[in-house]
């Protein structure tokens, strides 16, 4: 079987997902600011969740197609990749010191929801009742984040970070809506190409859909997080980078797995509990750093990268 066609499908899907995610984040961010939300609230919710839009659409598309391994693998793989690869690269560019108190609260929440995911995935199946439980969790988490962010008084430095990262809308509301609609359309098309191409690649390489979901699909759908964090690191905005990754990881489990399972119960055939435990380990390693207000140094970022590289190497058959 020729791998040219599925490879083109994957590449086309990645391009569409990237631009779709960018359009959705730009439009929804501007709309949220028009509705009176502060840049801090928008940065912690709309931006963090918006960069996870590719994961959402791809996982739902895979669930509808009966490819639960891709759906679950995408979420678990993205969470490991977000910390191991993306935060590793980000810390190499600029050491990350968290200043915003809410991120220190969100870190144990991220670990907690990762443990919930491990519990639910013990039988490698997430049904609609479990999906409803996860979805209720993301609703509660969002309410908590918005309420807390409105009450907390960040430092002037942190306020400046988010004000710069979340630019004020400069165009009419109709353009914001156009960005949202166009972004959703590109995400829908990109998810179709990526899931179809990735599935065919798995068959061509003789590997499971789970491995493709944990690696290629996870990497492709995490491109918005990578771009956001690298830009934040170059601008020396650590809270933006950390907030994006922590918020995205929480949303991936509660929001994406929840919605995907509500659409159609999903089974992760080929997903190992080891893959779930690795995502928990990556989340947990941030606890002592962020909870104590320490800095994620460059050498620690290098260790994260090395750990992620070793993990990925164990996935692919020799």
Image: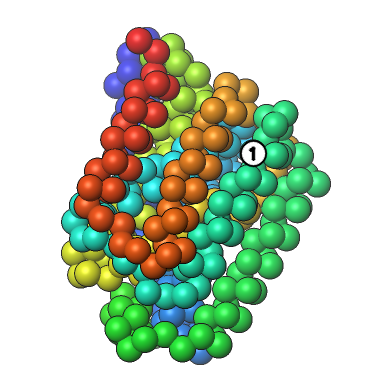
Q: Quadrant of residue 312?
A: top left
Q: How many marks?
A: 1
Q: Position of residue 221 (x, y in %)?
A: 41, 45
Q: Residue at x 34, y 23 (%)?
A: 313
Left-right relation of 75 to 164:
right
Residue 94 versus residue 180: which sits nearer the camera? 94
Quadrant assignment for the N terminus: top left
Q: Residue at x 29, y 41 (%)?
A: 303
Pick out the residue farthest to the right.
129
Q: Position of residue 310 (x, y in %)?
A: 34, 28
Q: Residue at x 36, y 43 (%)?
A: 84
Mark 1, other Cα within 10 Å: few <14 / some 14–19 / many ≥20: many
- Asked if residue 231 is positioned above or below residue 151 in the image, the reply reads above
Q: Report whether residue 168 is seen.
A: no
Q: Residue at x 42, y 22 (%)?
A: 315
Residue 92 versus residue 174: which sits nearer the camera? 92
Q: Position of residue 204 (x, y in %)?
A: 40, 14
- Asked if residue 248 is positioned above or below residue 103 in the image, the reply reads above
- Asked if residue 57 is positioned above or below residue 170 in the image, the reply reads above
Quadrant assignment for the C terminus: top left
Color encoding of the figure: rainbow
Q: Report whether residue 85 is seen.
A: yes
Local secondary structure at mark 1: helix
Q: Position of residue 56 (x, y in %)?
A: 54, 50
Left-right relation of 147 to 173:
right
Q: Which residue is mark 1?
A: 118
Q: Quadrant of residue 20?
A: bottom left
- Asked if residue 15 is positioned above or below residue 206 in the image, the reply reads below
């Amino acid at each position: 079987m020729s791998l040219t066609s599925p490879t083109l499908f994957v590449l086309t899907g990645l391009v569409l997902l990237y631009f779709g995610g960018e359009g959705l984040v730009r439009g929804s961010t501007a709309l949220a600011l028009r509705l009176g939300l502060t840049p801090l609230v928008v940065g912690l919710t709309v931006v963090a969740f918006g960069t996870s839009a590719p994961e959402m659409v791809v996982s739902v598309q895979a669930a509808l197609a009966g490819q639960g391994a891709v759906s679950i693998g995408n979420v678990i793989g993205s969470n490991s990749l977000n910390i191991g690869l993306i935060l590793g690269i980000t810390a190499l560019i600029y050491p990350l010191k968290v200043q915003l108190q809410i991120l220190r609260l969100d870190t144990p929440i991220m670990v907690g929801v990762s443990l919930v995911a491990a519990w639910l995935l013990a039988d490698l199946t997430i049904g609609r009742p479990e999906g409803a439980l996860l979805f209720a969790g993301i609703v509660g988490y969002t309410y908590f984040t918005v309420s807390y962010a409105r009450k907390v008084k960040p430092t002037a430095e942190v306020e400046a970070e988010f004000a710069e990262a979340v630019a004020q809308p400069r165009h009419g509301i109709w353009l914001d809506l156009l960005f949202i609609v166009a972004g959703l359309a590109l995400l829908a098309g990109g998810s179709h190409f990526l899931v179809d191409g990735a599935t065919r690649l798995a068959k061509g390489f003789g590997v499971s859909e789970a491995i493709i979901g944990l690696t290629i699909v996870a990497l492709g759908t995490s491109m918005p997080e990578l771009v956001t964090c690298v830009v934040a690191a170059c601008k020396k905005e650590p809270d933006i980078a950390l907030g994006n990754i922590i918020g995205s990881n929480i949303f991936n489990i509660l929001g994406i797995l929840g919605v995907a399972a509500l659409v159609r119960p999903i089974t992760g055939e080929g997903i190992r509990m080891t893959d779930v435990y690795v995502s928990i380990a990556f989340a947990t390693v941030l606890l002592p750093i962020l909870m104590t207000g320490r800095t994620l140094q460059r050498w620690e970022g290098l260790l994260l990268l090395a750990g992620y590289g070793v993990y990925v190497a164990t996935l692919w058959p020799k």
